[in-house]
Amino acid sequence: MAQESGFPAMVNDRLLRAARGEEVDQVPVWVMRQAGRYLPEFREVRAKHDFFTMCQTPSLSCQVTLQPLNRFPLDAAIIFSDILVIPQALGMEVEMRPGEMSSSPTPRALSLNLSYTYHTRILKPPNMGPVFPSPLRGPEDLSRLAPPGDACTKLQYVFDALTLTRKELKGKATLIGFSGAPWTIMAYMIEGKGSKTMSNAKGWLYKHAEASHRLLKIITEATIHYLVGQVKAGAQVLQVFESHAEHLGPQLFRDFALPYLKQICDQVKEQVKQLGLPDIPMIVFPKGGHYALKDLASLKYEVIGIDWTVDPILARELVGPTKVLQGNLDPCALYGDKKSIDAAVKEMVQKFGRHRYIANLGHGMYPDMDPDHLAAFVQAVQKYSKD
Amino acid sequence: MAQESGFPAMVNDRLLRAARGEEVDQVPVWVMRQAGRYLPEFREVRAKHDFFTMCQTPSLSCQVTLQPLNRFPLDAAIIFSDILVIPQALGMEVEMRPGEMSSSPTPRALSLNLSYTYHTRILKPPNMGPVFPSPLRGPEDLSRLAPPGDACTKLQYVFDALTLTRKELKGKATLIGFSGAPWTIMAYMIEGKGSKTMSNAKGWLYKHAEASHRLLKIITEATIHYLVGQVKAGAQVLQVFESHAEHLGPQLFRDFALPYLKQICDQVKEQVKQLGLPDIPMIVFPKGGHYALKDLASLKYEVIGIDWTVDPILARELVGPTKVLQGNLDPCALYGDKKSIDAAVKEMVQKFGRHRYIANLGHGMYPDMDPDHLAAFVQAVQKYSKD
């Protein structure tokens, strides 16, 4: 394959094959946020560096991307980065702050090192959340944004991290690049931080439909450049996170999400083709987008990720026989003991079936999870999914 | 009807009839959180009194309950109270604090009066959220809870508010009482505040299944007493809010939510019958519980509320022909202009049909909404739903 030149030959292309709908010897497995704070070796790096410094330093990004693969027999590495690098590249300031939208009852302390000293009886690291000190207040603020065509010149560090990681992976796993979907990015840019209702961002959709489309187009254009750049740099699969699908509904999704998700998929595939690179499998993950699965199946994404609220049997009915499904164990199932994880994975694999399926959680790892329980998850997938 | 003795005769029983599945001249309409901070007259009261003081003072609760009915031709009043009075009655401390899980980008200021002075260009009151200073940290904390049978002796103020309001309503609208569903209350008691993931509470379900059931039983028992007390006091319809259904999935819901929702409905109806009172229509509202609609249709709740992510046609397929549906306009649609509200309501009523339907939003009003836009919503329901 043309793209492979300069990179080590693939020793394990299980995920890549499954994403293309090809036969595999066992179900490939990776998990969202597998490079993250639940790993002590990640927290060790994080204690020394700012979150975005880690994103922006290829050697650090590569290091933490590979950490989970050193522990678990995963079939993919997802580059350590953040969906908010796009708003940053468009000229917006983003900070990571503790306690924003935290799931912890006491998110006051900031101690992102190895010793969590809390007054609770539960060992629980503080959650961090992104904050925009100057979110978009109204349509007039769109003039603050940098031209989307230039955005990727500022994201060379992601491309460098991908190239380095692809080499370091030595073909042992598929390298996944990613971006946020336009609505999800727009919602962050307007809310300025996590929100239970996203009512400011949704207010735009109802009050400023034209400006919303303008903003979504800017994000879409920057995202297409960005994802094509990731492929050129060595990404072998791309995942687009529509993390805020839950706030839309069938009609808002059709109006403000689906057209941009379509453009991204179509354009990325077209441009990758024009570059003479092999077709790249793409994953779309609509968190909370149960209502959108049928619509999404009409796009060219090979893989559709589902969260834990959607039964796998229903998901298969909705997306049809040819799409690959990815998911969907409730992340919180990892709080259970290893026996219960094993049983839950068994049921999950039975429901999804062994083909056209990539095993994953229905959302990302949480910081207070036990790495050994993720090991039990991965092990169970492999146990129950061999042909 | 026996229950009606001592209360004014019903002048408008449209909602009551619709909830029982009877024919109505037009679709009844009310909206969740219709008594709330979007109303200047509510904020005027709220500026002078603490949130829970308002709940605990029957004259104040009655006053704000009736406020929206003085403005809009609504078919129901829902008593001003809070689902967290149950944890309070079980002995837990609950405070209202600004900025918890806020949807506002700048929730720092606390100025719950009529003049919102913000440094943003958007007029936006700060959101308030409940906080438990001492949430349940582990199963051993269950011993802190008061016996559920005694809980309702502390909630006499709700019963008094209902009786007063029922009289003041003069039969012009149906009076709705309510409670939280057990899982929803449990999640608050453990998280201690709003949470994006509810990972602490969900952790209990996976780690402490037995203790979770013990806690859910305690809440269920208190809730049954509480709801029967509400009927005795004058409530004509009861709504059970499963506001945190979105965090469960099909299996967790079947294990930890459905059995308790069933018990509540069965037991309340049974005890109401034993008291010689007429059968009371009950509504269950599983926010984010798209996956649970079929299961819920097997219970005796006459009405199932749906949020805006579920298409009304699909909801009808899932619950069958005899249940009454309630919902489901995206609350944020009220940010649009009156013309767009009218169009959205027209489509909604067409999809639900005029019978076995109660018009509502898919969630509650937000504090920054324009009362005139709610007026447009109510007006449009009446315009498009007359026989």
Image (cartoon, coloured by chain):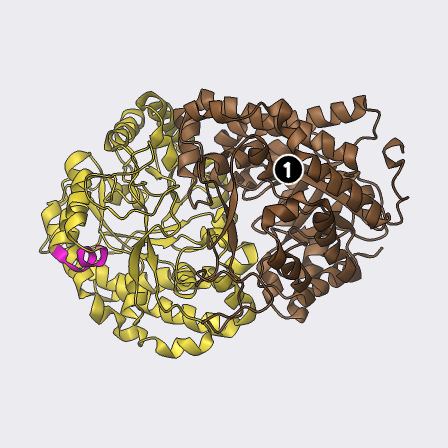
Chain colours: A yellow, B brown
Q: Tell whether position A133 is magenta.
A: no
The answer to whether any part of residue A384 appears in the image is yes
Q: What residue lies at 29% left-to-right and 72% top-to-bottom?
A: A91
Q: Is residue A234 left or right of residue B260?
A: left
* Magenta portion: prevailing SS class: helix
Residue A262, how many percent across, how many down? 41, 61
The answer to whether B358 is drawn above or below residue A150 in the figure is above
Q: What residue lies at 52% left-to-right and 72% top-to-bottom?
A: A208
Residue A275, how many percent across, how many down? 22, 66
In this view, which residue lies farthest toward the front?
Answer: B48
Q: What element does badge 1 sit on?
A: strand
Residue for badge 1: B179
Residue B209, how many percent across, how many down? 44, 23
The answer to whether B103 is drawn above or below residue A150 in the figure is above
Q: Is residue A43 left or right of residue A309?
A: left
Residue situated in front as seen by the camera: B206 or A256: B206
**Chain part drawn in magenta:** A51-58
Residue situated in front as seen by the camera: A337 or B54: B54
Where is the C terminus of chain B found, in terms of image quarters?
Answer: bottom right
Residue A287, how many percent across, how many down? 43, 48
Q: Place residue B386 in its image quadrant.
A: bottom right
The answer to whether B139 is drawn above or below residue B308 in the figure is above
Q: Place residue B233 in its image quadrant.
A: top right
Subunit under mark 1: B
